[in-house]
């Protein structure tokens, strides 16, 4: 056993990580759009004009897209003197600025920031078993700090001892809790024959019953529900207790993996913005999308070798007349990596490869250890060729909005660390454009079809945000951390890739504008959290694009945007 503080010594402190994350959000959503920020003398300056506060932070490296790397404490100017402040004071200033800006008070905000700080601290302070040698699970369980453009990425409810028992950061492993449910009290659906075998093979049950595995944490929260107790008394549900092979939590916490199948459970715990449960429409929607997307996935895989989609072909839940139990015990079956990864290819969570800090063994800095600029560019071009074309083809050719943010993409690499495959996962975020799929949507219940769709504008914003701002920009940043002088050339490669795809799709106006450098949509996580909106209703702010050709050529002629050699 090696403790996290020793293993991660010098990576970052919880205080600084939380402060930097808050500044990232403030810069992107408030100070930047209001032109209240500057980069000068290796420092980032941000003004909160309504509070009359000027803030400063040191830069490790500046970024062409404004996703700067920060270091050290945050300072404020008082009477012409710079004074260090902690994350709590910074959060209070942001609280005050947003209240003055919006006229709305949010009494949850400071508590959620504190909860996120506690989550980061726990991840850094908790002893972690040595990595198992499974590079994929190491990647899933290495995200100690969360989304760096979310104000409260590690905010969560639930007791600390439960988090220690079930969190990916602790490299938890545990058996599922098994219920045997009389067939009349089961609701299930399958897109392909045999898909429910992922559940049935875990344990035998008496004739006339079906096995329903439950996340043990969720079962502990729901075991005293009156409808469940009554079903147990009647014998319609049998409590078989823990059993079967152990599962491990992935980065999403509630999606578990046994090396063969992913099982996506409900978990009545709030993580960042949302209570993490499978709504009834999401259960039906996962199977409906799997059916609908089969020809789309087949077409993309044929046109773009290395592309595939992890299907979600089945679900099962309790049907006891209680929506709370139906959603609370709903489990979605997702294909395991073995169903889609090619031989000799290792799957890695893209978010871990691109993480700002190398807290796991699969970080890009380790994949490219010793690689020079030429090798880094070769890696980047291979990656872009795998990632970008299928996402755009899904949108323009099939009316499908994939959600390729960093936590929804598994990168397959060969023995040399070179990109060979890209797998898209989690159909919860995959949406349809109604104009392409009117007949299919008309055949679904309204409460299933509605959440499954985006209009054209919202769908495009989601694609561009997830693909470029959330994903490409962050992977690019990890490369630029190693080779700062390459950043303009890395963005030039992105522009060339997009220009090639625009030509392939007949130069649609949306892609032409993107290549020309129109502002990019960035999800407004801070403002969404402040306004207490559902994640689906999150808005976007517009940020300057690094794809403008004049900016790229000028940046290539000048000194690199870096404070380090």
Image (tube, helix red, strand yellow):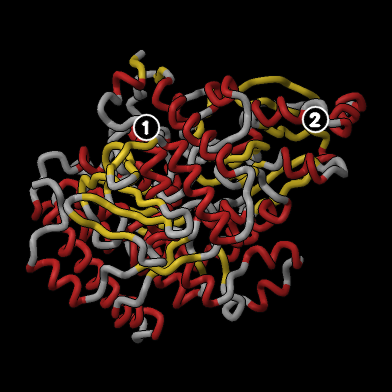
**Label 1 crowd (10 A; few <14 / some 14-19 / many >=20):** many
Q: Where, by quadrant of the figure, is residue 441 drawn?
A: bottom right
Image-based side of 327 in relation to 513, left or right: right
Vertical comparison of 362 with 485: above or below? above
Q: Residues within 10 Å of mark 2 (few under 14, many from 20)?
A: few
Indicate left or right for 562 with 140 as reference: left
Measure the C-alpha gap from mark 2 to mark 1. 39 Å
Position of residue 305 measured from the top left corner of the image (x, y, whole percent):
32, 62
User: Residue at image x 43%, y 42%?
Assistant: 90
> In the rendered image, which quarter contains the N terminus?
top left
Q: Would residue 260 be found to the left or right of residue 223 on screen?
A: left
Q: Residue under circle 2?
A: 207
Q: Is residue 467 visible?
A: yes
Image position, residue 549 (x, y; %) = 20, 76
Q: Residue at x 34, y 44 (%)?
A: 78
Callout 1: SS: helix
Task: Please give the name of the residue rendered at 68% of the width and 31% of the height, measured from the top-left corner.
Answer: 218
Up-down: is 101 above or below 554? Answer: above
On the image, the x and y values in percent for residue 552 come to 18, 70
Instruction: Looking at the picture, tell me which residue is in the foreground, 64 or 328.
Output: 64
Q: Which residue is mark 1?
A: 138
Q: Residue furthest top?
A: 1
Disc 2 secondary structure class: loop
Q: Is residue 362 visible?
A: no
Q: Which mark is residue 521?
A: none
Q: Determine the residue positioned at 52% across, 34% down.
A: 114
Q: In this picture, is 508 found above or below 257? A: below
Along the horizontal axis of the image, is 61 left or right of 175? Answer: left
């Amino acid at each position: 056993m090696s403790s996290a503080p020793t293993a991660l010594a010098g990576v970052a402190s919880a205080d600084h990580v939380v402060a930097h994350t808050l500044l990232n959000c403030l810069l992107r959503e408030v100070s930047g759009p209001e032109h209240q920020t500057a980069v000068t003398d290796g420092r980032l300056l941000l003004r909160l004009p309504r509070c009359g506060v000027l803030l400063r932070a040191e830069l490790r490296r500046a970024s062409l897209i404004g996703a700067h790397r920060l270091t050290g404490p945050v300072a404020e100017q008082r009477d012409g003197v710079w004074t260090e402040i902690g994350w709590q004071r910074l959060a209070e200033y942001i609280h005050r600025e947003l209240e003055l800006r919006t006229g709305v008070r949010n009494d949850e905000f400071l508590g959620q920031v504190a909860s996120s700080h506690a989550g980061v601290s726990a991840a850094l302070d908790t002893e972690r078993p040595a990595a198992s040698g499974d590079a994929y699970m190491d990647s899933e369980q290495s995200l100690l700090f969360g989304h760096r453009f979310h104000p409260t990425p590690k905010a969560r409810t639930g007791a600390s001892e439960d988090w220690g028992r079930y969190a990916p950061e602790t490299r938890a492993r545990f058996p599922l809790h098994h219920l045997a449910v009389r067939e009349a009290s089961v609701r299930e659906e399958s897109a392909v024959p045999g898909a429910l075998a992922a559940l049935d093979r875990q344990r035998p049950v008496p004739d006339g019953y079906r096995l329903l595995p439950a996340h043990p944490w969720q079962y502990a929260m729901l075991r005293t529900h009156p409808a469940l107790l009554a079903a147990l008394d009647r014998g319609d549900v049998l409590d078989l207790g823990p059993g079967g092979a152990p599962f491990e939590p992935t980065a999403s916490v509630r999606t578990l993996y046994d090396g063969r199948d992913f099982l996506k459970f409900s978990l009545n715990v709030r993580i960042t913005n949302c209570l993490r449960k499978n709504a009834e429409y999401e259960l039906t929607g996962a199977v409906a999308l799997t059916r609908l997307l089969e020809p789309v996935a087949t077409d993309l895989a044929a046109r773009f070798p290395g592309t595939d989609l992890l299907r979600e072909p089945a679900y099962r839940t309790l049907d006891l007349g209680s929506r709370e139990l139906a959603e609370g015990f709903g489990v979605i079956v997702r294909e395991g990596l073995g169903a889609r990864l090619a031989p000799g290819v290792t799957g890695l969570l893209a978010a871990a490869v691109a993480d700002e800090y190398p807290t796991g063994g699969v970080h890009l800095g380790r994949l490219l250890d010793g690689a020079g600029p030429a090798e880094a560019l070769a890696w980047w071009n291979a990656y872009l060729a795998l990632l970008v074309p299928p996402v755009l083809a899904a949108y323009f050719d099939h009316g499908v909005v994939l959600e390729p943010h960093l936590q929804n993409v598994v990168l397959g690499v060969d023995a040399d660390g070179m990109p060979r495959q890209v797998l898209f996962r989690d159909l919860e975020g995959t949406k349809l454009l109604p104009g392409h799929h009117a007949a299919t949507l008309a055949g679904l219940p309204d409460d299933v079809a509605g959440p499954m769709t985006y209009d054209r504008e919202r769908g495009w914003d989601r694609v561009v945000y997830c693909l470029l701002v959330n994903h490409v920009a962050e992977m690019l940043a990890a490369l630029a951390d190693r080779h700062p002088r390459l950043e303009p050339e890395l963005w030039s490669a992105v522009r060339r890739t997009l220009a090639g795809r625009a030509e392939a799709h007949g130069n649609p106006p949306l892609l032409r504008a993107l290549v020309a450098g129109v502002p990019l949509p960035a999800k407004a996580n801070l403002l969404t959290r402040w306004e207490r909106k559902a994640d689906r209703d999150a808005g976007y702010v517009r940020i300057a694009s690094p794809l403008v050709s004049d900016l790229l050529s000028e940046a290539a002629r000048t000194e690199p945007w870096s404070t380090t050699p």
